[in-house]
Image: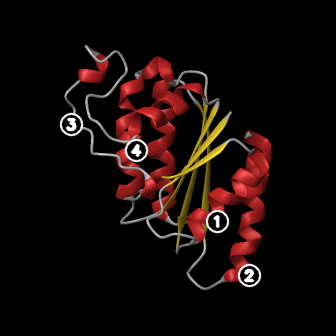
């Protein structure tokens, strides 16, 4: 199963549309992080001890953690905010700490970043490297796509969506 999580706080904008295009090809489930009540990770370690993979916090994350546990492919889509993913999706990513490394091993991680700069910009290189290191550490297959489209260039964006669809065909 493919689980797609999009981190845009703005409904219907480019990152949502990227996630939806991926979902059209791959199927699976699409989650909008802005609709998830995901408290920041406290770093308390409960999930790795007494919690046995369950977070002590009472919010919307435990069902998402279970979905990640069952997924074969996890797709993270986010606009780039200040050379990083949005805070909206960062809380979700941080809370996946409850899975431990073995909860990820053998799965595929697909990361799609959307920004106003072209994909050869340094911001994409920094994010690609960060997620590649994370995927290597936890034993996941990895694919990255930078989708650079300045706001208002709809025709150009439509062309770049075809690259998103091709990535979905390749990775499921």
- The residue pinned by badge 3 equals 42
Query: Which label sits on residue 92?
Result: 4
Residue beneath the point at 51% across and 49% down: 128
Q: What whole-number distance in Å separates the C-alpha atoms at marks 1 and 3?
A: 32 Å
Q: Is residue 119 visible?
A: no
Residue bearing the label numbered 1: 17
Query: Mark 2 falls on what kind of element?
Result: helix
On screen, residue 95 versus residue 14, left or right, reads: left
> Where's the C terminus, which quadrant?
top right
Disc number placed over residue 155 in the picture, else none = 2
Q: Which comes sooner in the sequence, label 3 or label 2?
A: 3
Label 4 environment density (alpha carbons within 10 Å; few <14, some 14–19, many ≥20): many
Which type of secondary structure does the marked residue at label 1 adopt?
helix
* Number of numbered discs on residues: 4
**Labels 4 and 1: the sequence-earlier one:** 1
Q: Percent position (x, y) of residue 143?
A: 63, 43
Indicate which disc, 4 or 2, sits on the residue closer to the N terminus.
4
Disc 4 from disc 1: Cα separation: 20 Å
Q: Is residue 143 left or right of residue 171?
A: left
Q: Tell me the CA gap for discs 3 and 2.
A: 43 Å
């Amino acid at each position: 199963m493919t689980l797609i999580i999009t981190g845009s706080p703005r409904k219907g904008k480019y990152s949502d549309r990227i996630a939806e295009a991926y979902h059209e090809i791959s199927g699976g489930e699409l989650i909008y992080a802005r609709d998830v009540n995901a408290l920041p990770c406290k770093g308390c370690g409960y999930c790795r001890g007494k919690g046995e993979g369950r977070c002590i916090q009472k919010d919307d994350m435990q069902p998402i953690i279970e979905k990640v546990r069952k997924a074969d492919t996890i797709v993270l889509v986010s606009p780039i905010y200040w050379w990083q993913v949005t805070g909206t999706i960062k809380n979700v990513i941080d809370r996946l700490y409850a899975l431990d490394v073995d909860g990820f091993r053998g799965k595929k991680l697909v990361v799609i970043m959307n920004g106003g700069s072209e994909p050869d910009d340094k911001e994409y290189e920094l994010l690609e490297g960060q997620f590649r290191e994370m995927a290597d550490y936890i034993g996941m297959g990895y694919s990255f796509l930078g989708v650079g489209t300045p706001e208002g260039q709809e025709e150009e964006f439509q062309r770049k969506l075809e690259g998103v669809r091709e990535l979905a065909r390749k990775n499921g």
